[in-house]
Image: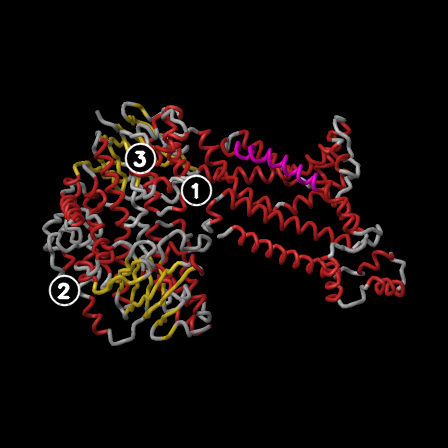
Amino acid sequence: MNILDIEDLSVVFTTDTGDVPAVGGVSLRVRPGETLALVGESGSGKSTVALAAMGLLPGNARASGRVTVDGTEIVGAGEAELAGLRGRTASMVFQEPASALDPLTRIGRQIAEVVRNHRPLSRAEAAREAVELLRKVGIPEPERRASAFPFQLSGGQRQRVVIAMAIANSPSLLIADEPTTALDVTVQAEILDLLRGLAADSGTGVLLVTHNMGVVADFADRVAVMLRGDVVETGSVEEVLLRPTHEYTRRLLAAVPRLKVDGEGGVPVGATGSVTGAGEASAPVAAEAPAPGDGQATAPVAAEAPAPGEKPVADDEEAAGPPVVHLRDVAVRFGRGPGAVRALDGVSLDVRPGETVGLVGESGSGKSTAARVALGLVPTNSGSVSLFGTDLGRARGRARRALLSGVGVVLQDPVASLDARMSVAECVAEPLRTHRRGMPAAERRERVAEALELVRLPRELARRGPRELSGGQRQRVSLARALVLRPRLLVADEPTSALDVSVQRTVLEVIAELQDELGFACLFVSHDLAVVQEFAQRVVVMRAGRVEEQGPTMSTLLHPETEYTRRLIAAVPVPDPVAQRRRRAADRTGATA
Amino acid sequence: MDTLLYLTRRVLQALAVILIVTIVVFCLLHALPGGPARGILGPQATAGQIAAFNHEQGLDRPLPVQYAYYLGTLVHGDLGTSYTLNEAVSRLIEQRLPKTLVLTVLSALVGLLLAIPLGMWQAVRRNKPADYVITTLSFVAYSTPVYFLGLVLVLLFTQTLRWFPSQAPQGDTLAQVFADPAALVLPVVTGAASMIAVFSRYMRAATLENLSEDYVRTARAGGARQGAILFRHVFRNSLTPVVAMLGYYVPVLFGGALVVEQLFNYPGMGLLFWSAAQSSDYPVLLGCVLVISVATVVGTLLADVVQRIVDPRVKAGRA
């Protein structure tokens, strides 16, 4: 019998502006011990399906159709009946471990609460059980940690606590909604291992909601692809990821940036043509190179993007000029006394004119801080920073402002980084108002229109507010704003990590094209090694405030010199189930060896 | 951070704030037209009489000197002598302050005990008739001036219904005040009304915000029932911002006492301040303002300390 059976499920949200259908007639099933991955882009309705399966839809949602969990009907069931099911028969792991736990309750108590919701144990017994669960999910010193508050744990540990709560009563169905999206790759690999182990041990069925094809390849047995509230393709993970039949699945897979790894197929990366993927026998999807006649939707981004192999040539010619940014031995401390955090410790890096340098590392490695130092936003404790050959630390007042006007910035969050009360045109015009005070209004308008055109945004959008735009459009507004002063350096801090893969591709494409056209250099901060590999000529790997290693992208990411970089690369799941299985096996033997 | 170090730092900060308050009030009061002499001696006083008074009271000396002198006596607990009542200000305050404290603390307690459950209940019944009714009443209570609300209550309960007396307890000691609880009802209710309105709104908003937090969904996914979610998780999380707000509400409470005491003829600090303001009785005004600002500073300090206890993140400097 299936542990989860969804038949013709439809969900409609009632909003002020009328009914919005989110899911339209979805049918799925999960057998015991099996993992079904539900994939799709934001707004496809995949999370809504997951919440519907738990009976956790928000109050303005109406569900119809049938959802049965272990034989119990969920749609239309009362709160009391659902409460008896949740946490015992079916349980859930959420995306955001930072907010998924009650900030004021000790984690041991929160786990014990789930235990006691369903089993008649005393407080002390439940507390002991909570410690055992913490041990099971790999929290060190569980007895001591049980009395910690959520804020005292790292993101990965918090997610382990959420998982401990989910498995507290050995459920037969585990629903995981983007369980690793908010985590670093190395932590993601650990959490996926943990979930895989727990599911295998207990025969639990898993519904895994994710947008990450690498995670799917790593974890799932079967895959269902959602598009605008419908399942468009279902099949085994090999079928769907390697031989997709639906047009949308193919497009989605083509948009996924793929990390090329040495040893996987052993593709030597030549000076040119590397991204055509001609030699990638192991990846029949040929993500980077859509087959001819694949339809215009598969716009061959990669072919237009600067091939990593091409740029260094140009780079050498330009290397004569001084670097646009030069950090030498920079140290940054936050706070003082024994509690001070060494955010940066002896960091040196250069970005030369016209080149793109990828800054990678886990969260807390200092990559964003380094970018902020280059922007003059973070004062340094020692070392020197120069922009365009001038020492930023010595420049004051007008000279400093003039220097900084040569740097544009695009930040991660497309919602938070634009002022919601300004129109798009005002957002883009603001740098001109600040740095080109004497500019006549007519010329300013022209420059704004020009910048919007550069990032391929239609003129009509100029008068709208940022909130009326999609995430990708907003990020292009940020880009227009960054480029309106015609900077010589663009600092992009995780510019696409809040975006869907297909949108990410268009944004990256626009940046790459404009870089070719306008010739600015780019300091590209990202946690996504695949994106950096595709986009940057050189890469700087950071770890705990230090530069772990740096070099040309292809050599550093294919033949890393340090163990840390090797681990970082090994942790990235590739969206190919066969290759991923092989890598995992290799990693395991490598780890035991 | 170490709790003792934290407390020391906060107390020093509080003292600095109080010092600044004395300077501001001192300057403000001296900027009044006519100055205190005109207030004491009346409009008929001659320039000579005013000059003599100013000289006698030291009011002709430079302001910084006057201020320094004032501070010096302050340290010895001497707040000066009232111009009109001919009594030490410290003694006046000593007599009146406990009564005002009784009034404000009772009002605050009654207000909070009603407002917090009310706000939570409204949040749970959001956008249902009960919520709308209470919301409307809150806005009415909040937008009605305290003296008007007090008058309505007096008319209704002392004239029409004759349930309570129209005067607050008149006794000099606290024992006498508490001996007549029925007389305390109307002043306390009048003082609590706006508190209920404000804090039920506040609690409603905080509860609604917390109800939409991810951790509520996690608790629900773990099989927790609505009641458990509300009382085990949401209540505590919603209370922390309310506690923080409470400290800043102290001056509002004293402001309310000013009106309530006048209205019910209750001889507390409010009434003292009122009559002192009318007769430009500088030393009394300064003394009252000082006491109220100390109370405000102590109130916020207490609120911060309570928050440190309730929310472990505050102590770790993470919230």
Main secondary-structure element of the magenta-colored stretch: helix
Please, what secondary structure does the residue beneath circle 2 have?
loop
Chain holding disc 2: A
Q: Which residue is mark 3?
A: A50
Give, as a single range, the part of the protein colored magenta: B101-121
| Pointer 3 chain | A
Classify residue A587 as left or right of residue A385. left
Mark seen at residue A103: 1
The mark that comes first in sequence, 1 or 3, is 3
Q: Quadrant of the N terminus of chain A?
A: top left
Quote the CA–CA distance across marks 1 and 2. 52 Å
In x, y percent, where is residue A469? 37, 50
Q: Residue at x 84, y 59 (%)?
A: B38
Q: Residue flagged by tag 3: what amino acid is it? A: Ala
Name the N-terminal-most of marks 1 and 2.
Answer: 1
- Please report, as a chain letter, where disc 1 is located: A
Label count reads 3
Mark positioned earlier in the residue sequence (3 or 2)? 3
Give the secondary structure at mark 3: helix
Q: Is residue B113 magenta?
A: yes
Residue B89 in view here? yes
The CA span between labels 3 and 2 is 46 Å
Query: In the orientation shown, which residue stands out farthest toward the bottom?
Result: A320
Residue B9 falls in image quadrant? bottom right
Callout 1: helix, strand or loop? Answer: loop
> Mark 2 highlights which residue?
A271
Question: Is label 1 or label 2 in front?
Answer: 1
